[in-house]
């Protein structure tokens, strides 16, 4: 059967016919992201865990490392080179993002978008950033999981994802705590003993700090309106 792309609901229905367990999990993942304003952190972690589990199930090897599983899927022709790079790119690949969520201090990392020629930073510590990323990649991963599962069915599905992937621009950038404070309009030189703090404490202070520029703009607007 040939079709360029399936909706999440269609994907879940097909997967459910193959495995009720995986179909239900994909349904739960979709619900978490879409209901009650969504939970970005849980949605992404859930999605990445499902992806890894389904990839490994297709090779009947749950002990393999994900990086190796993705390489094998490319080598045996199950995924394309573009899909492989989307998953395994060492800088901004899905596997790297999955590792950051599981093992890193997320305060360091930002999702970058270029809007009107200006780079806009979205902190990975923000739920809205994770939801934005989920929206960018989830349809692709749902379809990729479906196609991989379909190789074990009577009629494998031919789903071409290369163009969809080429339209996704994911850029992850690490920022120093000083740079993040600058974004908030705060000069770290006014913070006592800043240079003596360890890195983790600096990032913790950053996360607890308000955006001075935003507060200033709000106050200026209120004051201006009051004068008028």
Image: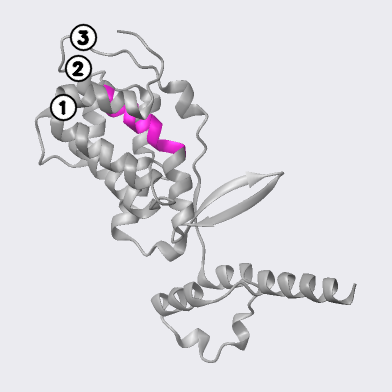
144 is within the stretch colored magenta: yes
Q: Residue furthest right?
A: 228
Residue at image point 26% right, 33% down: 70
Kindly give the residue lying farthest to the bottom in the view shown: 192
- Rendered residue at 50%/74% (across/down): 206
Could you say which quadrant of the image residue 48 lies in? top left
* Residue 212 visible here: yes
Tags 2 and 1 in contact by the CB under 8 Å rule?
A: yes
* Relative height, residue 122 to residue 159 (above, below): below
Q: Secondary structure at mark 3?
A: loop
Residue 217: image x %, image y %? 74, 70
Q: Nearer the viewer, mark 1 or mark 3?
A: 3
Q: Is residue 196 left or right of residue 211?
A: left
Which is nearer the eye, 59 or 154? 154
Q: Is residue 72 left or right of residue 191?
A: left
Say above or below: 199 vs 45. Answer: below
**Residue 93 on the magenta span:** no
Identify residue for label 1. Answer: 58
Say which residue appears at 46% left-offset and 87% top-offset: 196
Q: Kindly report the distance in space between the C-alpha atoms of the residues bearing marks 2 and 3.
A: 8 Å
Q: Quadrant of the N terminus?
A: top left
Work out whether residue 54 can be spotted.
Answer: no
The vertical placement of 29 against 61, above or below, is below
- Label for residue 151? 2
Numbered range of the magenta stretch = 136-146
């Amino acid at each position: 059967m040939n079709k360029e792309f399936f909706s999440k609901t269609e994907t879940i229905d097909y997967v459910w016919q193959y495995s009720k367990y995986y179909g239900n999990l994909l349904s739960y993942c979709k619900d978490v992201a879409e209901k009650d304003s969504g939970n970005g952190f849980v949605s992404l972690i859930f999605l990445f865990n499902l992806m890894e589990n389904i990839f490994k199930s297709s090779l009947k090897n749950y002990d393999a490392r994900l990086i190796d599983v993705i390489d094998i899927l490319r080598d045996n022709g199950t995924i394309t080179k573009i899909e492989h790079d989307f998953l395994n790119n060492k800088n901004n690949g899905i596997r790297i993002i999955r590792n950051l969520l599981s093992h890193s201090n997320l305060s360091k990392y930002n999702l970058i978008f270029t809007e009107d020629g200006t780079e806009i930073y979205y902190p990975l510590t923000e739920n809205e950033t994770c939801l934005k990323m989920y929206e960018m990649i989830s349809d692709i991963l749902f379809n990729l999981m479906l196609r991989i599962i379909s190789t074990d069915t009577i009629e494998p599905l031919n789903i071409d994802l290369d163009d969809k992937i080429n339209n996704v621009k994911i850029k992850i950038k690490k920022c120093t705590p000083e740079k993040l404070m600058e974004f908030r309009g705060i000069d770290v030189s006014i913070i006592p003993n800043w240079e003596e703090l360890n890195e983790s404490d600096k990032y913790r202070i950053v996360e607890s700090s308000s955006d001075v520029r935003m507060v200033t703009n709000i106050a200026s607007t209120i004051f201006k309106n009051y004068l008028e």
